[in-house]
Image: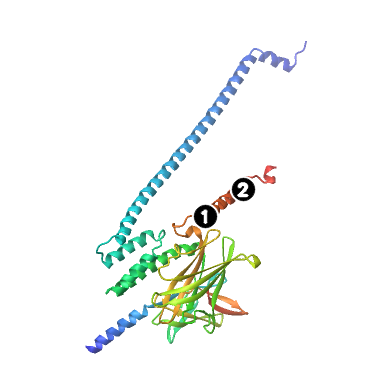
Amino acid sequence: MVRDRWDKVAIVLQPVGGLLTALAVAILGFWTSSFLREREARETALRERMQTSDTNARLYSELISKREESESALRKDMFTSIINSFLATGPQTLEQKVLNLELLVYNFHESLNLKPLFLHLERLAKDSPQRGEYVPRLNRVAEEVTKKQMLVIEEGGQSFDATASLKTLAFPSPDGRTEIPAISRDLALDGVHRNFKIEVLGADADKEQVQLRVTVRSGGGSAADTTAAEFWLGYFDFPMIDNIRLPNDQRLAIVLNNFDAGRQSADLTVVFFPGKYAGLREKPYYDEVLAKLLAANKTLARELTPTPAARR
Amino acid sequence: MKTRLFATGLLLALASAAGAAEIHGTLSEAGKPIAGSVLTLDCSGTTASAKTDEFGSYSLKVAAAGECRLSLERAGAGLALRVTVYDKPSRYDLEVATEAGKPVLRRK
């Protein structure tokens, strides 16, 4: 009987077959267990990293909220003590009053409308022998704050400047030969187009104020929505606080840059800006907040939904 | 002595007047700043000139206030704009635009 090569191999491997099977099972078991161990270690490390990150975020938010709380308390105390100094009876020099106003303005100009206080102190200063010292000081503070606020809101919005003649209550043309009764501009912000028309109705040389009518047209054609407002504008109208509220969380502010009673001229800046740059005094319209949140959710859902190509 | 005092007073008055009136802003065309252009401000014979910087910014100070003429030489054409100069600085952001086929200088 002739045995071929495979029969010889079978004879040789028969005694070690069991041993090889056991060895293969042991290797497979070792490999599987080390794979599982590695995976578990990786997952544990990831979990620990996430926990650390969560802990850090929680700690950071707690620190921020604590700091906010202490700052609010400090600002509240400061505000109460300064405002009481104006309301309390008793002798107080003009210097103290102006100093207190400066403290209020520099610390709370984004939250409070301080125009009444400015006007009150201006009246006192004009009646005082130190008129020449305090009136320019009040104007300087107001100018400084207005410039600071304009720097912020112009960054987020759109603006234009205009010079008005207080003699004719009109706006001179660029060549100065003719005058137009109103200045009108189209401005767009966040996809919302509006037309702004400014008219000068009057001027008060003593108070250095101009009376304006602002007409805002939104939309176009027959569907245009028109609103108009009339008001007196002076150096103490701060754009972040004293502005016209428009739909879609937008604002319109006008700033009086210069008023020259002698030459009967006034220089204005009109700024159209998003509501998020306005002062902290105003609460948002809740329906607008909801609409924004819903729009953000829709966008997110669209981004997360896989496209047909991605599904394939 | 009197002459010296008068001269000092005159110098001081001129110095304070010189810093009194200023216009500043930017010059652009089609939204792009115009650098290196010379702007001249003429207030009833009192003139001041300034060159725009790389961002199109300029600042002009004159020892006079009131109605003035701001001019610019651009591509061989003389462009001008009437401006009002106050005791406090005023901003004039300018742009070169085309109106009825002609270049004009106007406030932005």
Image location of residue B43, percent across then percent down: 44, 84
For the residues labelled 2 and 1, the Cα–Cα distance comes to 27 Å
Residue on which disc 2 sits: A303
As displayed, is residue A116 above or below residue A59? below
Say the numbered circle drawn on residue A259: none
In percent of the image, x 61 and y 20: which residue is there? A24
Crowd around label 2: few <14 · some 14–19 · many ≥20 (10 Å): few
Extreme residue toward the right, this view:
A1
Of helix, strand and loop, which one carries label 2? helix
- Of residue B13 and residue A112, the one placed in the foreground of this image is A112
Image location of residue B34, percent across then percent down: 52, 73
Residue A239: quarter of image: bottom left
**Kind of residue sitting beneath label 2:** Glu
In percent of the image, x 49 and y 79: which residue is there? A169
Crowd around label 1: few <14 · some 14–19 · many ≥20 (10 Å): few
Which of the marked residues, 2 or 1, is nearer the chain's N terminus? 1
Say the numbered circle drawn on residue A285: 1
Extreme residue toward the front, this view:
A89
